[in-house]
């Protein structure tokens, strides 16, 4: 049976039942919930979900997801295509960053990664109070896909220069 893969972006006011409403719409169309990342951010509930639905049910699922807007859930639906294989020569690296919060940290690090052809597969960030001072502490973790022609050492050197300018600690490790 042919299937269609969809990536859903969901946002709603944080309240009980958001995931239930979304999962019911998916299940009612015999779609399979493949993976998701969801969180409460700034009083809103936001998430991304990948589903596989029988192609014959794809239109009905789109309609059901669109109808959730009446319940306060906004769902952006994107048909997924298989990502081109990087040829198996790329490497996966794990990046961790921590330091005093300030505007521009993500922008400067991501700009350096993009210049070097590094793909950000996952990124998670947070701000919290530092234990001793109470100052805002910024944390980031990322899973990166590094092209074969780029050495971990040269990428690390470039990121360390930026980290020094930003006054943050940065660790880059193979996974």
Image: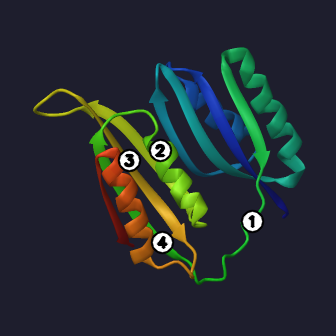
Find residue 24 and report its horizontal and vertical position in percent. Answer: 65, 34
Q: How many C-alpha atoms fall within 10 Å of the one at disc 1: few (<14), some, or many (≥20)?
A: few
Helix, strand or loop at label 1? It is loop
Find residue 104 and report its horizontal and vertical position in percent. Answer: 46, 38
- The image quarter in which residue 52 lies: bottom right
* Mark number displayed over residue 106: 2
What quarter of the picture does the N terminus occupy? Answer: bottom right
Residue denoted by label 4: 92
- First of labels 4, 3 by sequence position: 4
Residue at point 41%, 42% (across, down): 125
Comparing labels 2 and 3, the label whose residue is closer to the camera? 2
Residue furthest toward the left? 132
- First of labels 1, 3 by sequence position: 1
The answer for how far apart the CA atoms under marks 1 and 2 are is 27 Å
- First of labels 2, 3 by sequence position: 2
* Mark number displayed over residue 82: 1
What quarter of the picture does the C terminus occupy? Answer: bottom left
User: How many numbered badges does the structure rendering display?
Assistant: 4
| Front-lying residue, 112 or 9 | 112
Comparing labels 1 and 2, the label whose residue is closer to the camera? 2
Q: How many C-alpha atoms fall within 10 Å of the one at disc 3: few (<14), some, or many (≥20)?
A: some
Does 148 sit left or right of 153 as displayed? right
Find residue 82 and report its horizontal and vertical position in percent. Answer: 75, 65
Residue at point 39%, 76% (across, down): 153
- First of labels 2, 4 by sequence position: 4
| Front-lying residue, 40 or 3 | 40
Mark 2–mark 3 CB contact (< 8 Å): yes
* Mark number displayed over residue 140: 3
Mark 4–mark 1 CB contact (< 8 Å): no
């Amino acid at each position: 049976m042919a299937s269609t893969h969809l990536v859903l972006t969901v946002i709603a006011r944080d309240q009980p039942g958001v995931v239930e409403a979304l999962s019911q719409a998916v299940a009612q169309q015999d779609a399979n919930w493949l993976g998701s990342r969801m969180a409460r951010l700034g009083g809103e509930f936001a998430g991304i979900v990948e589903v596989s639905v029988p192609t014959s049910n794809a239109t009905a699922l789109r309609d059901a997801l669109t109808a959730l807007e009446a319940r306060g859930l906004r769902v952006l639906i994107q048909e997924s295509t298989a990502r081109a294989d990087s040829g198996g020569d790329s490497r996966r690296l794990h990046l961790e960053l921590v330091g005093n919060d300030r505007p521009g940290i993500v922008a400067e690090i991501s700009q350096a990664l993009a210049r070097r052809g590094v793909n950000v597969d996952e990124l998670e960030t947070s701000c919290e109070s530092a234990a001793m001072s109470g100052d805002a502490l910024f944390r980031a973790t990322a899973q990166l896909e590094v092209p074969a022609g780029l050495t971990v050492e040269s990428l690390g050197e470039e990121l360390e220069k930026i980290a020094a300018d930003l006054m943050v600690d940065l660790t880059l490790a193979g996974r």
